[in-house]
Amino acid sequence: MMNFLFFLIGLLLGGFIGVTLMCLVQITRIHHLEGGHSNEKENC
């Protein structure tokens, strides 16, 4: 029973960390793309 509890806790923590990292990567990617486009508009 204790092993199953540790498994569930690990599964929840792993899922939370995975989702958080994926969101941060997407935010960084969107911010980088928007920054690149705004620089091109300013240079024209």
Image (cartoon, rainbow, N blue to C red):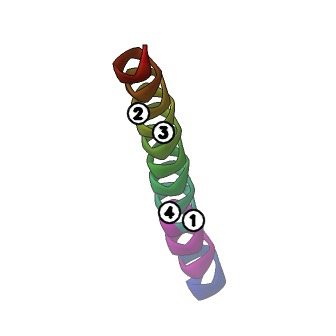
Question: Secondary structure beneath disc 4?
Answer: helix
The nearer-to-camera label among 2 and 4 is 2
Pointers 1 and 2 in contact (CB under 8 A)? no
The residue lying at 52 percent from left, 56 percent from top is 21
* Mark 1 to mark 3 CA distance (whole Å): 27 Å
The residue range painted magenta reads 6-13
Near mark 1 (Cα within 10 A), the count class, few <14, some 14-19 or many ≥20, is few
State the mark number for residue 32. 3
**Residue wearing tag 4:** 17
Kindly identify which residue carries mark 1: 14
**Kind of residue sitting beneath label 3:** His
| Tag 3 and tag 2, C-beta contact below 8 Å | yes
Tell which tag, 3 or 4, sits nearer the viewer: 3
Residue named by callout 2: 35
Point out the tag, 1 or 2, that comes first from the N-terminus: 1
From the viewer's perspective, is the residue at label 1 or at label 4 nearer?
4
Q: Which amino acid does label 4 sit on?
A: Ile
